[in-house]
Amino acid sequence: MKRDIKQTRNGHLTPRQLAILNLMKLGMSDRAIALELGVTPGAVANRISHGVLPRLGAVNRAHAVYLGMKLGFVS
């Protein structure tokens, strides 16, 4: 099974990271994202801080959303 992975400046975003990025765009908290995806808030925070932010080269959540929009990962 081939995974849908998007190329970034510093690596790839997995489908789960893309889902989190899209929910971040809506202004959702880690807790709200966790409820939506059926995971723990800690898992969401971990995916953001160790996955989404470094792979986009972002310094914070707002910057990640901006870069995600600029790169066409979120609309």
Image (cartoon, rainbow, N blue to C red):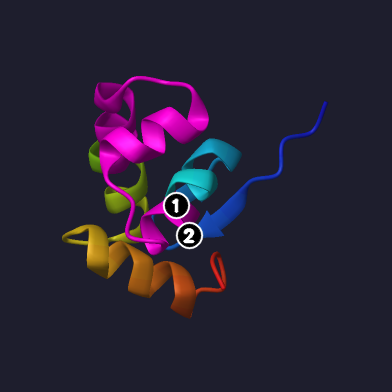
- Residue placed farthest to the right in the image? 1
Residue 23 is marked as 1
Secondary structure mostly taken by the magenta-highlighted segment of the chain: helix
Q: What segment is highlighted magenta in the picture?
A: 21-48
SS class, disc 1? helix
Q: Look at 45% across and 49% down and name the residue there.
A: 11
Q: Residue at x 46, y 79 (%)?
A: 70
x 47%, y 74%: residue: 69
- Labels 2, 1: front one: 1
Mark 1, Cα crowd under 10 Å, few <14 / some 14-19 / many 20+, is some
Which numbered disc, 2 or 1, marks the residue that appears first in the sequence?
2
Residue 55 in the image, given as x and y percentages of width and height? 36, 51
In the image shown, does 15 or 75 lie closer to the viewer? 75
Q: What's the CA distance linking mark 2 and mark 1?
A: 18 Å
**Residue 39 or residue 13, whichever sits in front:** 39
Q: Nearer the viewer, residue 13 or 36?
A: 36
Q: Which residue is mark 2?
A: 8
Placement of 38 over or under 3, stated as above or below: above
Q: Position of residue 25 (x, y in %)?
A: 40, 63
Q: Quadrant of the C terminus?
A: bottom right
Residue at the image position 41 percent from the left and 61 percent from the top: 26
Vertical order, 51 against 24 (above or below): above
Going by the numbered disc 1, the residue's amino acid type is Leu
Q: Indicate the amino acid at tag 2.
A: Thr
Q: Position of residue 72 (x, y in %)?
A: 57, 73
Which residue occupies the extreme left position in the image?
59
Q: Secondary structure at mark 2?
A: strand
Question: In the image, which disc is placed on residue 56?
Answer: none
Residue 57, position in %: x, y?
A: 28, 61
Is residue 31 found inside the magenta-colored segment of the image?
Answer: yes
Q: Quadrant of the N terminus?
A: top right
Occupied quadrant, residue 15: top right
